[in-house]
Amino acid sequence: MKAMPYIFLIEDNEQDEILTIKALKKNKVLNEIKVARDGAEALDVLFNQEASNYEKDLPQLILLDLKLPKIDGLEVLKKIRSNPRTKLVPVVILTTSKEDSDLLSGYESGANSYVRKPVDFHEFSDAVKSLGTYWLLLNERPPV
């Protein structure tokens, strides 16, 4: 039996990580959630896997914060998009940044979507529910 694809949350803020996971679970998202807390760890998870797990361990969705330690989110996104193995994985930037330059850079670097994290948990939960519904249930992924 094929394992359910996972969601890869790349988030350095522990509170935002907890809120995101709580919102996903509240909205009955059953996918496993893997977390990386900086850009270097995220790239290691995506690109330094054993060969036997190389294809099957791609996430169904990447939720990417921009302001990450070690390697920032935009650089992580560029590396994801430049690799033939990961270039089609949906990446949603999930950030508190309100900078138009971040929004533009995110899309120019290949983000599929850009969502500003609402401060209120109920609004945040609704945003995560919409993300989960669209990217995990409605969106048709390209064949591997």
Image (tube, grey):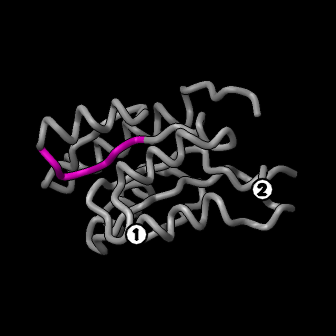
Crowding around mark 2 (Cα neighbors within 10 Å: few <14, some 14 to 19, many 20+) is few
Residue visible at 69% across and 43% down in the picture: 85
Residue type (three-letter) at the residue carrying disc 1:
Asp
Sooner in the amino-acid sequence: mark 2 or mark 1: 1
What residue is drawn where x is 22% and y is 36%? 103
Query: What percent of the width, then of the height, locates residue 33?
Result: 54, 61
Q: Give the image quarter of residue 102.
A: top left
Position of the C terminus, as image quadrant, is top right
Is disc 2 placed on a helix, strand or loop? loop
Q: Is residue 71 above or below residue 116?
A: below
From the top left corner, tell me how far across and down residue 108 is, in percent. Answer: 34, 30
Magenta span covers which residues? 92-98
- Please indicate whether residue 14 sits to the left or right of residue 56 in the image: left
**Amino acid at pointer 2:** Tyr
Q: Quadrant of residue 115?
A: top left
Mark 1: give few (<14), some (14-19) or many (20+) Cα within 10 Å.
many
Task: Give the residue at mark 2.
Answer: 54
- Pointer 1 residue: 38
What residue is at 86 percent from the left and 62 percent from the top? 52
38 relative to 54 in the view: left or right: left
Numbered disc 1: secondary structure: loop
Could you give the CA–CA distance between mark 2 and mark 1, rounded to whole angstroms?
21 Å
53 up-or-down from 77: above or below: below
Residue 60 badge: none
